[in-house]
Every structure is written in C-alpha cells, then in structure tokens.
C-alpha cells in the first residue's frame, strides 16, 4: 500500500469515533434554524453539510485543511525552480491534512503515472460527439463513459462492506485524477486544434498538462496554480454538493464526479469564467479597437445590469470580500503579464464594478470572485477558446470533490435526503409567525 493510502487509512480510523460520538451522544443538538427565505432561496447558508477538507470564511476566504492560499503555496513541495507546488502534494494535503515530504510527493506522482492511460474507447466516444458540443459536455461524457472501470462499483457487486468502502473510492479517485488532465488536453486539441494530440509525457500533473496543451513554461506553473486554486470551496457550492449528493446514493466516483461537473457547467457557477471573457470580448467588439475609458466601462456595466443580466465574475453566495483566489491570480498577472491589454481591462472592472453593484443595491457581495481573473491568464498563454476554461476548472475541482467523497465513504455518511414542504405549508408557518 502507498504511504498516502496507509496514512489515509489511519486517519479515517482515528476520525471515525468523533463522528460516531457526535451522532450518538449529541444527535439532537441544534446546529441552526432554517428561515422561509432560505427554504425558497437555494438553502443559502443553511448549516447542514460536514467536511474537514476546506472551510470558507465569508471574510477571510478559503482555507484548505486550515491553510490559507499563500500558506498552502508556501508549505507544499515544489518542482525545482518553480513558484507553485506539485498538485499531487496538494492532493495529499487535502486527503490527510498533512504536508507531504518530497519523497511522499514523488511516490504519488509515480503511482499516478501507472494509472494515467486513458482507455481508447474514451477517444472514440469523444470523436463520435458533434464537434460543436460544449467542451464541458465532452468532459462529463468522458468521465461517465469510464464508469465501467470503477473499482468501487465492482466492490459493491461483489459484497459491499461499509468499513472498507473508502478503499475503492480512493482507488477510483486516483485513477480519475491521473487521467483527467489528458482528457482535458485531448478535448482542447481535438476540438480547437484539429486533433493533433500530444502524447502524455508522464511527469507531474502541471508539467504533463502544459506539455499536452503544447504551451511552454511557465504554463506548467499556471496549471499547478489553476488546479489548486479551483479545487475546493467547502461542500455547499453546486459542483461539490452535487458530487457529494450523488455519491451518497453509493454511486461510484465516476457517476458522482460526472454529475458534479454538470453543475459546474452552469453560468452562475464555473461557466462564469468563460462568461467574463465573452462579456469582455463583447465590450472590445463594440469599441472596435479603441481602448475603453473608465466612463465607457461603467456604461457597459450599467447596460448589462439594465438588460437584466449579471456581471460575471462578481458576487458570491458566501464570500463578503474580494476572493483570495482572485487576489492570488492577480498577483500572478502583476508578475507575468502586467502590460496585457485584457488584464488592464479586468483591473478596470475591479475599479468600477463594485461601486455600481453597491449603488444598484442588490448583490450582497459586490467584489470579484475567482472567475473574474482566471480567463485573463489562460488567454495570455494562448487559450483564447474561452468555452474551454470550465474544463480546466473541472480538472481542479475534481481534486477537492474526490477527496471529499473518499472521506464521505470513510466516515459512512448517510444518503442525503432533505425534506420538502409545500407552498401552503410555508404560508401556514408564516401565518403562525
Ligand atoms: N451582477 C448583477 N447582479 C448580481 C450579481 C452580479 N455579479 N451578484 C448578485 N447579484 C444579484 C442577484 O442576481 C440577486 O438578484 P435578484 O434578487 O434579482 O435575484 C441579488 O443580487 C442578490 O444576490 P446575492 O444574494 O448577492 O447572491 P447569490 O448568493 O444569490 O448568488 C452568485 C451568488 C455568485 C450566483 C451571484 O453573485 C452571481 O450571479 N454572480 C455572477 C456570476 C458569477 O460570477 N458566478 C461565479 C461565482 C463563483 C463560483 O461559484 N465559481 O464557480
């Protein structure tokens, strides 16, 4: 057994009594109340999910296993001469809560190399899809079609045991993570570049992805940063929650992840990063080559809001300040692309949008989120096909949600089944005050 899996087994064993005790001894203790607004309004902030992988504080932003983004980037082992850590080391951190040594990181990279061959039928299925299919539809299909490889599904068929069920969930997660970068790169090169697929070089995830995309350094570091930043945002966001919900039916990691990726494909969620670039391109088309002034940008923002649309890349369901994932990418832009035209436009949006959203008085958080900045970096390195951005988000998000569902199995989390009420029942509750 790998040292990661051995440690994970120990951590799960150590953790189980805490969960069991909470349910047995304190099962009736109230965590919170639910208002009518929350019941109708997308269960916003209802406290009914449990995860130890990451926690999102409204003011501070995300912490992965207790580490802020800068702390995470500083603590984990990095390839020589690179600014961002190995994604494989981050996976170890999410699963165990511990920072791996370089040796432990190398062991995961070797393990993933052995698992990284994508079954050839995946390419056949993707090639059979209409070329104009959205790349997220292709990505989700590729994940789903591999379901027959599931070790968890086989384990279930052969005699399920709740205590050891996490083992095959972990195995499926490792297999998936090893293959997703090649699937994403294939979709990109097949859909937009005429099928010239570059062989998987079988190094670390960041290097592999950059090479398969055909983009030189520092794009390997961009990939590392991008996958880590997009990995996890606690359990309530739509992609994480969907993955968890589907996994709670004892579906395997392939079904669960594919469903989670369907949620990520929504414009209010992961697709927002494509929408930011699409919106900006619309602005640039209207300007026909002229540089926008702040006054012009304000007008475009007002026009968008007045036509009933949202400003993509701004606002958040939980955060109440600028997303540290935005800040982190902004720092990268300041270092590597300070004079880029689109970076300047995005920076101008940062100056004008919050005041306008505040003046309109609806958005609870007028500040930018992760999606406001990520497309700029991809565009700079030549990925101008912005409908592909959510696929890269998906590769990153897989790391977080797969760590979560492995732990879900480890702790034996129950089938998710909240209760519905009718509108009349709510009216009745409202009347009684
Ligand atoms: N532009 C215009 N209006 C906005 C807005 C924005 N960026 N953000 C929020 N609002 C509006 C909402 O549409 C809502 O209006 P209605 O009352 O008319 O429905 C009102 O302000 C209150 O919304 P909220 O409570 O502040 O925000 P929600 O929790 O309902 O929604 C969203 C959070 C992220 C979906 C929202 O801010 C939004 O639509 N933003 C733009 C899309 C976006 O950037 N999505 C990516 C979010 C990050 C993420 O998950 N990435 O994957």
Image: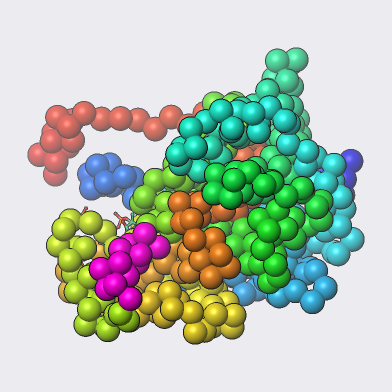
Question: In x, y percent, where is residue 86?
Answer: 75, 62
Q: Answer with the quadrant where ligand 1 appears in the image.
A: bottom left
**Which is more toward the observer, 213 or 109?**
213
**Drawn side of residue 355 relative to residue 428, left or right:** right
- Which residue: 53% across, 70% down? 380
Most common secondary structure along the magenta stretch: helix
- Which residue: 69% across, 46% down? 197
On screen, residue 398 above or below 171: below
State which region is magenta. Answer: 277-289
**Which is more toward the observer, 223 or 291?**
291
- Res 354 visible: no
Question: In x, y percent, where is residue 368?
Answer: 38, 69
Residue 265 highlighted magenta (yes or no): no
**Which is more toward the observer, 13 or 250?**
250
- Res 373 visible: yes
Question: In x, y percent, where is residue 232?
Answer: 56, 55
């Amino acid at each position: 057994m790998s040292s990661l899996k051995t440690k994970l087994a120990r951590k799960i064993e150590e953790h189980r009594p805490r969960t069991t005790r909470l349910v047995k001894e304190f099962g009736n203790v109230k965590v919170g109340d639910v208002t009518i607004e929350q019941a109708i309004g997308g269960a916003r902030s209802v406290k009914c999910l449990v995860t130890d992988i990451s926690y999102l504080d409204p003011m501070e932003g995300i912490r992965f296993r207790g580490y802020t983004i800068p702390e995470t980037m500083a603590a984990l082992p990095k390839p020589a001469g690179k600014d961002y850590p190995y994604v494989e080391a981050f996976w170890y951190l999410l699963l165990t809560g511990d920072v791996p040594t370089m040796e432990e990181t190398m062991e995961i990279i070797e393990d993933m190399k052995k698992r990284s061959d994508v079954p050839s039928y995946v390419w056949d299925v993707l090639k059979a899809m209409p070329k104009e299919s959205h790349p997220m539809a292709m990505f989700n299909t590729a994940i789903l079609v591999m379901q027959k490889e599931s070790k968890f599904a086989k384990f279930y068929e052969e005699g399920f045991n709740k205590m050891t069920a996490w083992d095959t969930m972990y195995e499926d997660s490792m297999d998936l993570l090893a293959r997703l970068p090649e699937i994403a790169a294939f979709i990109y090169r097949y859909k937009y570049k005429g099928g010239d697929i570059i062989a998987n070089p079988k190094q670390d995830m960041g290097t592999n992805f950059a090479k398969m995309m055909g983009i030189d350094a520092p794009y390997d570091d961009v990939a590392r940063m991008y996958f880590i930043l997009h990995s996890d945002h606690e359990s309530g966001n739509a992609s994480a929650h969907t993955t968890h919900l589907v996994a709670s039916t004892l579906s395997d990691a392939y079904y669960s992840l594919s469903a989670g990726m369907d949620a990520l494909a929504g414009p209010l969620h992961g697709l927002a990063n494509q929408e930011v670039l699409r919106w900006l391109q619309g602005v640039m088309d209207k300007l026909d080559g002229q540089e926008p002034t702040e006054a012009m940008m304000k007008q475009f923002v007002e026009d968008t809001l007045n036509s009933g649309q949202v400003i993509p890349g701004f606002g958040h369901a939980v955060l109440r300040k600028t997303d540290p994932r935005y800040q982190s990418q902004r720092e990268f832009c300041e270092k590597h692309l300070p004079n880029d035209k689109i970076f300047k436009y995005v920076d101008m949006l940062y100056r004008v949008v919050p005041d306008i959203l505040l003046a309109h008085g609806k958005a609870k958080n007028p500040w930018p989120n992760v999606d406001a900045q990520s497309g700029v970096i991809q565009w700079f390195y030549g990925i101008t096909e912005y409908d592909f951005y959510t696929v890269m988000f998906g590769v990153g998000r897989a790391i977080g949600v797969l760590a979560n569902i492995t732990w879900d199995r480890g702790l034996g989390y129950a089938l998710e089944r909240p209760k519905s009420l009718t509108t009349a029942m709510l009216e009745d509750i409202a009347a009684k005050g």
